[in-house]
Image (spheres, rainbow, N blue to C red):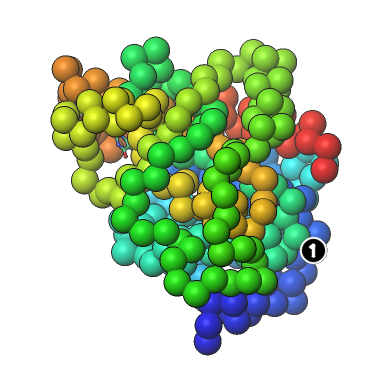
Amino acid sequence: MDIQEELQTSVGYLRERGVGEVDIAIVLGTGLGGLVSEIEELMSFNYSQIPNIPVATVEFHFGKLIYGKLGGKRVLAWQGRFHYYEGYTMEQVVKPVRISKLLGAKALLISNAAGSLNPDMKKGALMCIEDHINLFPESPLRGRNMDDLGGRFPDMCEPYDVELGSALFRVARELDVSLYTGVYAGVPGPQLETRAEYRYLRTIGADAVGMSTVPEVIAAAHINMPCAAVSVITDECNPEHLAPFDIDEVLAIAKKSEPSLTRLFKGFIDRLPI
Ligand code: HPA
């Protein structure tokens, strides 16, 4: 089966079980799955039930797809993403994006946990991603182009939709949620960065660094799906005072920031003119 057939099989399975129109798809990052409790769930699937969907292996990812209503919109929420560092191929990493689009999603909203390289952004801060730097060793678009999905050379002038970004800031102001803006560097991981690498990332213009999102956003650009992404800053990567990475602390900070992120996403979806 080629990738397009695989995607069609997954989409067919979800349609047969009653997944209807989708206004917006949401990919939830590490420790940030709580938004789903706000969804008026119509149906949900464990990833293992859906044909051709790999099973999320990271222990703190649930691997669940929820279809339901949020803020008057029909949402498809992917609780648990596929990270490149887990050994998934890039094609597997971006499957949620492509399936969402084939199900009719008109926009994509992404969250992730990231380390801060910008001294202004402390642990717990939220950052709207305005642009990214791709440091992954391969592209999800490498290989034969899937012409039905998009062109061979998608441009990356504006991979984060300006209108969706402005809408996020409007909602943030309205709800009194503090929101930074910045550039996200996507790295393959799973090892953290050295102090020299943090200096390098800052020098090349990154405000935050993490191990996800960039492949999904490239796939969204290919398929012409407007997207917006927010990083939750879970650690500060100051090369002069670098503390050892503590995954428990990262998860604790993600959990603490989750209510603001959830409020922001919910308010955003509520006001979305889709
Ligand atoms: N690097 C540094 N800190 C992080 C990362 C990363 O990739 N992800 C979350 N915090």
User: Is 225 rendered above or below residue 199?
Assistant: below
Residue 129 at x, y percent in the picture: 52, 32
Q: Toward which corner of the image does residue 45 lie, by quadrant?
A: bottom right
User: Is 18 rendered above or below residue 83?
Assistant: below
Q: Name the amino acid, label 1.
A: Gly
At x 21% / y 46%, what residue is drawn? 191
At x 48% / y 25%, what residue is drawn? 182
At x 21% / y 34%, what residue is drawn? 197
Residue 1 at x, y percent in the picture: 52, 87
Position of 74 with respect to 236 (left or right) is right
Q: Quadrant of ligand 1?
A: top left
In this figure, which residue is indicated by the disc labeled 1? 20
Position of 96 with respect to 118 (left or right) is right
User: Is 103 rendered above or below residue 107?
Assistant: below
Specify the quadrant that holds the C terminus.
top right
Q: Toward which corner of the image does residue 179 lie, by quadrant?
A: top right
Position of 127 with respect to 187 (left or right) is right
Residue 137 in view in this figure: yes
Residue 78 in view in this figure: no
Q: Residues within 10 Å of mark 1 (few under 14, many from 20)?
A: some
Residue 139 at x, y percent in the picture: 42, 59
SS under mark 1: loop
Q: Nearer the viewer, residue 35 or 125?
A: 125
Residue 62 at x, y percent in the picture: 47, 55
At x 46% / y 53%, what residue is drawn? 215
